[in-house]
Image (tube, rainbow, N blue to C red):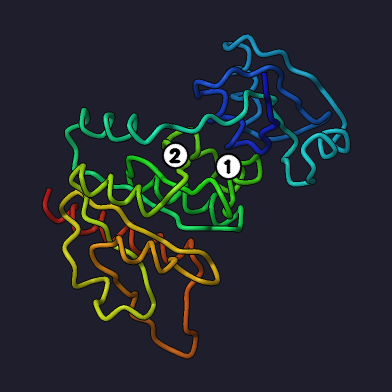
Amino acid sequence: MKDETVYGFNPVMEALRGSRRAFELFVAAGARDNRLEKLLKLASEKGVPVRHREKGDIARLCGTDHHQGVALRVEAFPYAELDEVIARWRESGETGLLLVLDGIQDPHNLGALIRTAACAGAHGVIIPKDRAARVTPAVEKASAGAVETVPVVQVTNVARTLEELKGAGFWIFGADSGAAAPLFDQDYTGHTALVIGSEGEGIRPLVKKHCDLLVRIPLKGGVSSLNASVSGGILLFEVVRQRHTLT
């Protein structure tokens, strides 16, 4: 059985609360944090053995010093199936919201986008299998454990996936700095899938063709573009804002 080591308080806490099998919890000797007692209690309830190690040993285990003194060995991250995500959304009876990432390369951007999608109430995040970051412990740390709360789907063909989403009733909006349509002039109160492109190139041309509408974020000042995770956050919470006004 494949496993991985999740690190940092929030990712470890969410992993312990999630459905993945946890094998052992590592805690740095002399660790002092008001969240530690809660973490140890949760590990005890789950029957997860606790190992006390020096900080340097945990750093070697995680491959980074940014572990906050805790690490958890768990089953490898389980990706969801697109059919499962669509079925779960339909069962919820809610207005659909999906985030589609076309080639995000940076693990920190991927983690931040997953975290923002979870906070916005998205029903899933879709990423490509090739030429893109995948969910790793670094991504889990950057997401603050949000990968345990929102399904992440890996697909082989983003363009084909967009057509599947259209068939399921979603309207596809792609973020593109050269688009004529301003982001804030659109209606996102229906079932919505937002597409964010890679950090350097944006959405690939073939994927653009499968979007219903391309939208741009109006920018002021001398900077010509936003970080991918910032762009995703602006789009996601414009959807939240519009839907909130209807409640």
Question: Three-letter amino acid code at disc 1?
Answer: Val
Compared with residue 242, is residue 145 higher up or lower down, i.e. above or below? above
| Number of other residues with Cα within 10 Å of mark 1, as a class: few under 14, some 14 to 19, many 20 or more | many
Residue 163 appears at what percent x and percent y?
A: 28, 50
19 sits to left or right of 34? left
Residue 65 appears at what percent x and percent y?
A: 79, 46
Compared with residue 155, is residue 229 higher up or lower down, i.e. above or below? below
Residue 208 appears at what percent x and percent y?
A: 35, 66
| Number of other residues with Cα within 10 Å of mark 2, as a class: few under 14, some 14 to 19, many 20 or more | many
Q: Nearer the viewer, residue 196 or 218?
A: 196
Circles 2, 1 touching at the beta carbon (< 8 Å):
no
Residue depth check, mark 2 versus mark 1: number of the one nearer the observer: 2
Question: Three-letter amino acid code at disc 2?
Answer: Val
Quarter holding residue 27: top right
Q: Which residue is mark 1?
A: 135
Q: Residue furthest bottom?
A: 222
82 sits to left or right of 169? right
Residue at (50% x, 38% y) in the render: 147
